[in-house]
Amino acid sequence: SRIENFHSIPQRVKRLQGALEETPNSLMVVYKETQDLEDWRDELIEEVKGSRRSSTTSPGQAGYTRSPEVFNKIIDVLGDHFAIVLQLSQQVRQEVTKHICSCFELASDEPALLVRAVEVFMLIEDNAKRKFESMSEVMRENLPNMHHAFEAEIIISMRQAFDERIQAQYVSCMLQSADEGKTGIEAALLAATRGMVDMAYLKSDVLPCFPPDFKVLQFYREQFEEYMLPQVAALYSQNISNLELGDLLRMVSWLHNYNKQILETGAGDPPEDFCDAISNLMGEYLVRAAQQTRDWFANIEKRDSEVLPESDGCLVTRDPEDMLNIVNMQVSVAKEQLPKELRYKVIRGCIDELDAAQKRLSADLELVWKTTQVENLCAVVNDSYRMQDKVESLLDDVDRDEGGDGVAELISATDDLCRSYVVLAVDATKFAALSVMEDLKEPVLYQVFSPQWEDGSEQYAQIATKTLRDWFNDLSMWLPEYFFTKLVRECYEQTVVSYIETAMGKKVKPFQSSARASQQVINDRFTFAEFFVNDFESTLVASGMRKPGEVEESLEILTHISKLITAPMPTDVEDDIKWMLRHFGSSGERAILHIVGLRGLGKTSIDEWRFIISQDITEIGRDCEFNQTRYLLPWKYTSKGEEEGLDGRESGGGGYASTNPFGSVGGGVGVNMEKWKTAAKTISIASKFSTPKKG
């Protein structure tokens, strides 16, 4: 009955309050009973106020509002009961607020209780909404909308709880870090990291307990940044040039990870200040790391590195290992501190410093190779080639299939550097060959066509091949097979080039005996062929001279020169003349006249040779195969068909003075040696030293 219900209200309220305190998991049951009491209270108040008729009131019977005295007396009697129901309702709300604000602890220890608290919160909100919507329009206009009122209270309480948690954790962590001797930056970032851990926990464990539209993570982030953002910003707002490299890395890593977590958890956009700070701090770190690497590389470049043989005999230094140790140290530090995308920037910076060091070594080699020991040049070859594999190892942890311009640019820069080291190895091989030949040119090869050579008292070709054999025995152990084949080829072509260079030189005097000189050329050809063609043909083929007869073809010029020296008439050697014209291009006519001029021919004979040569030029075309010129490149034809190349130097020997552009011919017209030497340096590095394929 109503009287019994009314009489039992205090006992029911007391029982429900006890249940809240003793069994928190009964929250939903307590709420529902509390809601029944609230409904009873509201109905009774409405009935007392006369706003609606009781089911027992007849249509003609008036409500209590017509008698204020009666209304006040009833309220005095019922007031205590109304008050304890309201008190219970407030206690339920307090319990709900307490549990929701303890979301970190409950999500771990009692997630079911947290879920019940959230469910009760949602029911309270729905009930407030329903009540407001059930009011008359007049009442809605005059009474406040209590829908979302409880939600606003909970949000305020949650923010306050988050503030207390963030500050307590910060102070605790700072004190602990001080006891452990950590720096200020280390301590501050460690304390700030606690907030990042909280946000991750909120995302994984707490948010599933709340409705999607309740922005728990956003609330926490706002409170965290309100307190911590100024603390963190103070660390990088100072002069960043005063920060240690380690602190720079810590700052960049923390800021990047924070921004990344904000995006991954869906808590909004990263702070713009943090994005700008990452860019500035990372730029400073890269500049200083590059300078540090450059300084260490400079120390290696300045020292006198010891050349030692490896187990296979190849000569090397410790420079590649020491340089890669420096690079690997930089990369390993970045790997420990930085995320992958920023670590790639550090690797790229190291690649750029290695590239700069490679370019310095290449430039230095151009200047000092003549004064550098052959053993050291071989070490440059081997060190450079070994650097290729070592540089490629820097990409071991790089995901080549990963998209993004940064990865593509890093891979491209690394590939370019590897190719540069191979090119340097090729160039060093060439310089090693030239260094070997430098010892042979002046005392040996530049002495051919001298009186001692002509009379056979000095066998310069044999001296040259014997010396080269000694060198090749050592060099075959000092260099890998690929580079050794290129060195042999360079020495072969340099031998022939030096021989022809001497034969065409203006210092050559007319022969005492053309027949003897011609035979000596044949003997030299045989000596060179026995050495290069018989003993090293497979090596030269491996170097790229793979066309049938290509190895021996390089000596063919000596056969033609020997015939020109002894030919009675130019018509007897027209095939040789044409060969010279084809292979010497625009310099062919002068080369032929120089060779026959060494025989001491008179003007009439020279004119005969000139006439036959002019006919042959007409027959084969003046510029026939000009682009295939292999020897003597100091002259060229102008667009008018006139020949250029003389620089006013006088020819050697006597003879009549000609008005033609070749100068005198009696003792050999001579060659512009400086121009020839310049041209000789361009003899197909590309064809003789093509980049090796790995493996």
Image (cartoon, rainbow, N blue to C red):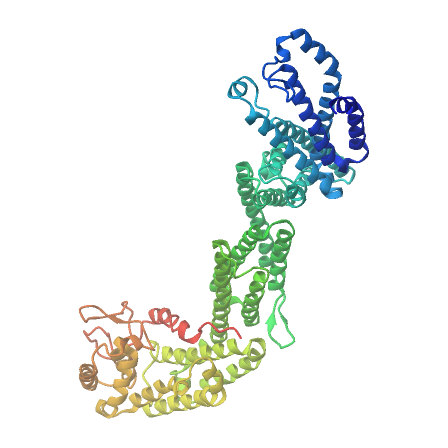
Where residue 540 sits: x, y (%)?
Answer: 46, 83
Quadrant where the image shows the N terminus: top right
- Residue 434 falls left or right of residue 262: left
Where residue 233 sits: x, y (%)?
Answer: 60, 34
The answer to whether residue 652 is seen in the rendering is no
Give the camera-side residue of 117 and 663: 117
Q: Is residue 428 above or below residue 295?
A: below
Give the camera-side residue of 212 and 284: 212
Q: Residue furthest top?
A: 69
At 66% across and 33% down in the image, what residue appears? 121
- Residue 693 falls left or right of residue 217: left
Picture quadrant where residue 637 is located = bottom left
Picture quadrant where residue 643 is located = bottom left
Q: Is residue 592 above or below residue 268?
A: below
At 49% across and 54% down in the image, what residue appears? 404
Picture quadrant where residue 376 is located = bottom right
The answer to whether residue 223 is seen in the rendering is yes
| Total count of labels | 0
At 26% across and 71% down in the image, what residue appears? 636
- Residue 556 falls left or right of residue 211: left
Where residue 297 sits: x, y (%)?
Answer: 58, 56
- Residue 608 falls left or right of residue 85: left
